[in-house]
Amino acid sequence: MRQEEAARYVKAVCRELELRSGYLSGAPVSTVYFGGGTPSRLTPEQIGQIINCIQNTLSLNNLEELTVECNPDDVTPQYVTALRALGVNRISMGVQTFSDEMLRFLHRRHTAAQALDAVRVCRESGITNISIDLMYGLPGQTLDMFRADLRTALSANVQHISSYCLSYEENTPLQALRDQGKLTPADDELCSQMYTLMCDTLREGGFDHYEISNFCRPGYHSRHNSSYWDGTPYLGLGAGAHSYNGCSRQWNPSDLDAYMQGVEQGSPVFDIEELSDADLYNERIMLSLRTSRGLDLSAMPDKERSNLLESARQFLSDGSLSLDDNCLRIPESGMFISDFVISSLFC
């Protein structure tokens, strides 16, 4: 993003916030997350502009967590120190893997050494809450290679790890390579073994497994992401950003020019989906069962609870679900294949 374009974009984000200042109905802002792209391409001054706009428009007096996503190769002592001065207290980095071979396959700019150095720089600059992303199920990735990634992540002494299985999205270069037979996807059995290895290794390393794909040292769960799983309303600003107010979802265009033009004209462009009672019920089940806390049945109306338990009966019998203290959960051993269980409980 060119600097003049970045300056225009920051101005548009601040303008969008002004136009949508009532979206959260005065609810306090407890977390702010700069992500969904490459926020480390913005200067600290530009990030500061947005933070000041949020403070002046919504107030940050109840702020608990302020996260900025960074590419490892963008991290410098000067950059992180400047972020800290703005109140940033959490850094999230898309490391993906500590294998240079796999990083080249993913077309990432950084090397494994740069990723480790970025973690060190963040820590030495005073950031005590560092999260990294790891991927598994990469073509050519072996169980031993992923084991090495996990051991390296533990030795880096980060506080949070998000780990995802590689997916093949429609109309992407990766999908095209797969369709052309130029790469062989990891099979389901290997991916399942990698997931089990991850759960066991990180647990032994002192991490809590608090959501299907997320692990943290005690007390370091992502407060921002947890609000998504709790159904807390949120406001997303910028191109491609999503928002939720408890009864509908809306999302901005991903196209940068379309987004900025709409905001500049005083009429932000977005799509909206009104959520029915059934949608909200299904989302509550899906989001709750992704977490280690599970779904609190005591908070449900009697009829809903009765219907849900009837649908869950077969899964309780075979161990795919557990029921303890009036809370429905998916055991860790079943989380990797939980989609079928969760969708079977939808109304």
Image: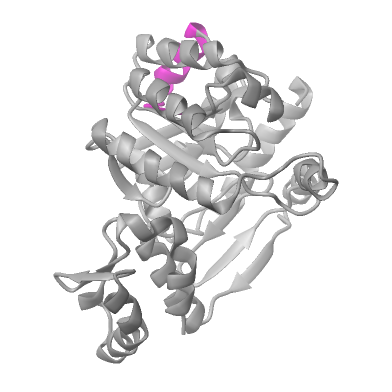
Residue 204 position, x and y percent, is: 25, 34
Residue 326 position, x and y percent, is: 18, 74
* 298 sits left or right of 151 in the view: left
Q: Quadrant of the N terminus?
A: top right
* 256 sits left or right of 238 in the view: right
The answer to which quarter of the image holds residue 84 is top left
**Residue at (14, 70) in percent of width and height:** 325
Above or below residue 268? Residue 36 is: above
**Residue at (48, 70) in percent of width and height:** 340
Residue 29 position, x and y percent, is: 38, 47
The answer to which quarter of the image holds residue 47 is top right
**Can see residue 53?**
no
Above or below residue 264? Residue 143 is: above
Find the magenta span and give its range. 77-93
Instruction: Single out the residue that lies furthest toward the bottom.
Output: 303
Residue 78 belongs to magenta span = yes
Above or below residue 20? Residue 205 is: above
Instruction: Single out the residue that lies furthest toward the left.
Output: 325
Instruction: Single out the residue that lies furthest toward the right.
Output: 180
Question: Across the whole image, how many numbered discs are drawn on residues?
Answer: 0
Along the line of sight, which residue is nearer the eye, 183 or 239? 183
**Can see residue 151?**
yes
Along the line of sight, which residue is nearer the eye, 277 or 345? 345
**Residue at (37, 18) in percent of width and height:** 156
* 167 sits left or right of 85 in the view: right
Name the colouring of the figure.
one colour
Along the line of sight, which residue is nearer the eye, 38 or 233? 38
**Residue at (81, 51) in percent of width and height:** 171
Residue 165 position, x and y percent, is: 54, 45
